[in-house]
Every structure is written in structure tokens, then in C-alpha cells.
Image (cartoon, helix red, strand yellow):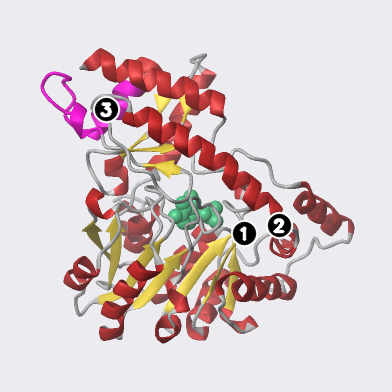
Amino acid sequence: MSIISDSLKRIKPSPTIAVTQKARELRAAGKDVIGLGAGEPDFDTPDNIKDAAIQAIKNGDTKYTAVDGTPALKKAIVEKFKRENKLDFNIDQITVGTGGKQVLYNAFMATLNKGDEVIIPAPFWVSYPDMVLLAGGKPKIVKCDEKDSFKLTAKKLQKAISKKTKWLILNSPSNPTGAGYTKKEIEDLAKVLMKNKKIYILSDDIYEHIKYDNFNFFTIAQISKLKDRTLTMNGVSKSYAMTGWRIGYAAGPKDIIKAIGKIQSQSTSNPSSISQAAAVEALNGSQDFIQKRSQAFKERRDFVVQSLNNIKGISCLTPNGAFYVFPSCKGLLNKKTKLKTDTDFVKKLLEKENVAVVQGSAFGLDGYFRISYATSMDNLKKAMDRIRSFCESIS
Ligand code: PLP
């Protein structure tokens, strides 16, 4: 009999982390690999945030804190929601964890019973289905079409709902497509959710600040009738280039927030005291960095989208947020190229041209691949040349 639990057998390691690891190994073996797999900004954490962490160490903020976040950080989060999203929360409606990932994991562990369904629009962030499975729930994957910019429509949502539906996950702007939902699109989904009063909504807003072309970010808890059924998750990883600091948070119904804290109290306890002090500065300090950084990302997005659309067999939408594009490689999956799937495409691209991207099927939608453009323009130029050479060589 295996020592490994049945619940662990239901899940697989993160495919995006696997690609990043593979690229790292090839690089260590002397290959000139360009990694476009990682989901993190290449920018450094701003100095004012680093200084706040150094000051916290000097002040002796090096002890356990309250399990689900310091009062100072919770207060900064309450103010963030008020300032940026026009949402009012009390301190006891806020929880802080070791990254948004832990907050989501705790939320599913705290709420899912065996057989409970979670609607996950595909393409999705790779961790959602596995977290749901680990918690004993059932992912209900709803494939979204390129013609809808890979976004969930009210019609598809209605069709996916069953008596067992407990949660709907919304992620805007999205990983892996970069698509952001407009206010109108969210209102359309809200109409369906208003009719189905038992469903809770998990809104993953981690890419809120990375947006382009005057896209107006709108989060579903802003629809007052749904606020009591929405857990809004966010964090400092992407917005403030703080992936390694591991701070994420959520706001929502008190009973869920309390349950999340209970799990945390028996697993990791508080997130790092020093990272929490840094996150207070990130949220309360100057936000200028966000604007500047978005401009740099926009230039990269424009370059990558244009370059990809100039390659025969590849087509790519222009997303309004995050730092990913999700191009189609369907035009190159045929007898002539001898490539059958997006996984074949991605593997051969890495083998032949040393460019690491992630296959769309890892995100629940075949025939596509994800590029993270959170890397230097030099790297992107080289990568686009190599992708073009590769596509020309096989067709
Ligand atoms: N949600 C989405 C959509 C993500 O892409 C990520 C990170 O890649 C997370 C949540 C978790 O971020 P973190 O745990 O760094 O806060």
C-alpha cells in the first residue's frame, strides 16, 4: 500500500512551475534558453517597500503576529478596498495569508464538502482545479471561446450551474489570457448569479493593477446584492513585484474569513511579520510605480502581439491586462508540420529554438500556448525571432 494519500493522487504538480524548472535546468546545462513561462514581474520590489521591511527588522517586528494578519496590514487593506474599489469592509472581514495561493487554498479547504462543484472558466490559472480536487470538491470546467476573448458568458454560466454548485471562480484580468471583464460583462454574469442564490463567487483580482488601454477594472463585489456572497482575493505579488515576499489577502463574509483563519492557525500560522510590514508600505505608500511599470508592460505587449500576428500559422488577441498573451497555434497543427497538439508545439519549440512557453492544455484549452512577457525587451526580441524561425522551419 502506498504511503501517499488518496487526495494527493488526485492532483499534479504545477505545469507552469515545471516549465520554469525545465528552463532553469537547460540553462544550467549550458543552453541559451529564453524562459517565457514564469508568472512574475521581472522588475525589482520598489525601494520604499524594501526599506519598510528593513525598518521592521530593526524595530524587532520579528515575532509571531495575529494568525490572519497584523491590525496595521488589515487596516491598509480595508483602506485599499475603499480607495480603489469603493468597497467597505470591517477589519473582521479581512484575512491575510502567505500569498494569494494560500488564501485560495484555505478558502476551498474551509468550504468544500465531497462532491461540491466549483465552476472554473477555462482557460484557467493552473492551480484552481487541483486545489478544488485536493479539498474534495469537483471542478466544473467551462470552456470559453476565443471569439468571447476567452471570457465566461452569462449563457455558459447558466448552463454550468447545478444543485451542487458552491463556487464560481472569476479571474480578471486573467492568467493565462490577460482578458479583463468589463463592468457590463460582470453585470451580465451577476444577473444569473442573482437568480441562483446559493452560489458563492471567488473573485481573484491579483492582476488588478496591470491593465492597459484605459481598461476600467470592476470587481463583482461592487454589485451590492452579491457582496455578501463574494470572497475577493488580491495580493501584493504582481502589482508591487513582490512574488517572493508571499503576501496575499481576501475580504468577504465573516464566517468564511474566520474559517480561513482557523485552517491557517493549524497549518502555517501568520505570514512573515517582515513581509506584512512591507505590504503595509506597498498599500499605503506611493502608487506611482504601478503606472510606470504598466507602461513598460504595455510596450512589451504591443511588440509581442504584433510579432506573433506576423507569423504564419499563429494568431493572437490583444489582451487588456496581466502580462500574458494566449496565442493560437492551431494553424500549425497538421500533417505537414507533424505536430498534433499544443504540447508537441511547445516541446519542439524548446528543443529546437530554446524558447520555453506553456501549452494551452495545461490551462484547460487545447490549441494555444501562453507567453509571459514579464521579461526584458531584448529577451522578447530574441524570443520572437526564434519563434518565427521555428514556425517557418516546420511549415
Ligand atoms: N491567482 C492567479 C491568477 C495567479 O496567477 C497567481 C500567481 O501566479 C496567484 C493567484 C497567486 O499569487 P501569489 O500566491 O503569489 O499571491
Q: Is residue 37 above or below residue 221?
A: above
Local secondary structure at mark 3:
helix
Identify the amino acid type marked 3.
Phe
Residue shown at 23% from the left, 51% from the top: 147
**In the image, is the residue at mark 1 within 8 Å of ligand 1 by its beta carbon?**
yes
Q: Say which label, 3 or 2, has the lower sequence index.
A: 2
Local secondary structure at mark 1:
loop
Q: Is residue 129 above or below residue 390?
A: below
Residue stretch rendered in magenta on the structure: 329-349
The disc placed on residue 345 is: 3
* Residue 25 in view in this figure: no
Q: Is residue 126 left or right of residue 273?
A: left
Where is residue 79? Give x, y as percent: 67, 74
Residue shown at 32% from the left, 61% from the top: 133
Q: Residues within 10 Å of mark 1 (few under 14, many from 20)?
A: many
Q: Say which label, 1 or 3, has the lower sequence index.
A: 1
Q: Residues within 10 Å of mark 2 (few under 14, many from 20)?
A: many
Identify the amino acid type marked 1.
Ile
Give the distance between the C-alpha atoms of the residues marked 3 and 2, in whole angstroms. Answer: 40 Å
Mark 3 vs mark 2: in front: 3
Q: Say which label, 1 or 2, has the lower sequence index.
A: 1
The disc placed on residue 310 is: none
Q: Residues within 10 Å of mark 3 (few under 14, many from 20)?
A: many
Q: Is residue 326 left or right of residue 83?
A: left
Identify the amino acid type marked 2.
Ser
Q: In this rendered view, identify the residue nearer to me: 380 or 268.
A: 380
Where is residue 108? Give x, y as percent: 40, 69
> Which residue has dot 1 on it?
247
* Residue 32 in view in this figure: yes
- Does the magenta run of residues contain 91? no
> Which residue has dot 2 on it?
275
Res. 174 image quadrant:
bottom left
